[in-house]
Image: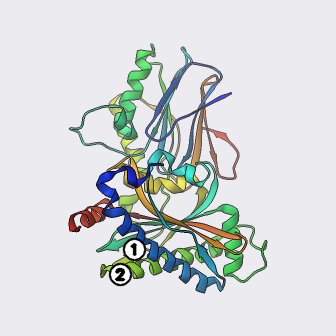
Amino acid sequence: MKDLYQESQFSEQLRPLLEVMAGEGIRSAGRGLSQMIGQKITVTQPAVSLVRLSEIADLLGGPENEAVGVYLRAEGQMSGQIMLIFPYEKALHLVDLLLDEPEGTTQQLGSFERSALAEVGNLSGSFFLNSIASMLGLEARPTPPAVMVDMVGAILDVIIATTAVVSEYVLMISATFLQGEREAEASFWVIPDPRVLEGFMNKN
Amino acid sequence: MNNIVVGLGEIKISNNGDDVLVAYGLGSCLGIAMYDPQLHLAAMLHAVLPACDPNHTHDNSCNKYVCCGIDTMLQMMLEKGAARNRIVVRMAGGANMLTTSGFSDIMNIGQRNIDSARMKLKELNFKISGEEVGGSIGRTVRFYVGEGRMAIRMMGGKERDV
């Protein structure tokens, strides 16, 4: 994983900016999720990283690992991709929490369960974008989320394919949401569109 | 069995009967394989994007494009003595992972990869002998060099031949 600090062009200007803004946005998303499930969610320190596309699947246990990805795009003055990813078992736990069922109830992710997970994506995405909007005055709307229950490689192809056109690396701001004794665990990734980053570079 | 991983934008080639060329978790990505049965020579490409800028410089970094990758793979096969009229082509992948209403067809990169492959292979006069493409579910693709066969596996499923 390539650290942004190694890119001198980016490090001084862009990294602190992204860490503060997106960091606050991600924490806001975590608070929204807490309200939604009625349980406290801890958010790990959000970090900005530049990751080689060929390595992003490794961040989630490898391309064949089974997971659930809730993907949405942000469109507007800020644009980019948001992906919420859960290891498959953790997604089942989260659905239990959402539906107020005892742990172990949910065994499969049918359309009802997937809708519940889509709502999680929708809500956390919206909280994130609203936070950015109030900090920067830049509006963005989330698209309806797509819920993918599949191998990590397949889930990440959408990010890989859209990024690969411009770069071998993807810049992401990420954090992990944890609930209780790691019962629910999700990675929250924000991937700004390159032109958005250029905009920041030029302003500063 | 030696697993030889074919990563994003890579092409791997082998004539070792113990080798298995494998591309894991293909969503919209497309795995295309060429096989010469007489030489027991196989190559597989893990393509990511449909088409490149026609004016670009052709080097290894553009194998992530279906069109360039197929050209490079064919060259690699021919350099090892494969004969065009013996080469068998199969492909798998190209799923549309985003099937919700919020995403337009522009984002159906999987289908565009499939279309690009069909066009390129037709241009090179290759027939596609087997394919398992499209849909909305990811696939792991394996090419068993010793047996000359391609197989796919989906999440929670059993492996089946292409």
Q: Chain of mark 2?
A: A
Q: Which quarter of the picture shows residue A194?
A: bottom left
Going by the image, does A101 lie left or right of A140?
A: right
User: Do tag 1 and tag 2 residues touch (Cβ < 8 Å)?
Assistant: yes
> Residue A18: percent from the left, percent from the top?
38, 67
Q: Residue at x 59, y 44 (%)?
A: B140
Colouring method of the image: rainbow
Q: Which mark is residue B77?
A: none
Residue B144 rendering spot, x and y as whole percentages: 62, 29
Which residue is disc 1 drawn over? A21
User: Which residue is at a point 35% across and 69% down the rendered structure image?
Assistant: A17
- Badge 2: few (under 14), some or many (20 or more) residues near its Cα, within 10 Å? few
The crowd level at tag 1 (other Cα within 10 Å; few <14, some 14-19, many 20+) is some
> Residue A200's x, y, as percent?
27, 66
Residue nearest the viewer, comparing A101 with B144: A101
Q: Is residue B120 visible?
A: no
* Residue in the image at 75% along x and 81% along y: A101
Asked if A116 appears above or below B7 in the picture, the reply is below
Image point (34%, 49%), residue name: A167
Q: Earlier in the sequence, mark 1 or mark 2?
A: 1
**Chain for mark 1?**
A
| Secondary element at tag 2 | helix
* Distance from Cα at disc 1 to Cα at disc 2: 7 Å
State the image quarter where residue B69 is shown.
top left
Horizontal and vertical percent for residue A67? 62, 59
Q: For this rendering, which residue is in front, B151 or A40?
A: A40
- Which residue is labeled 2 in the image? A135
Give the amino acid type for the residue marked by disc 1 in the picture.
Answer: Met
The front one of B30 and A162 is A162
* Residue A106 sits above or below residue A37 on the image: above
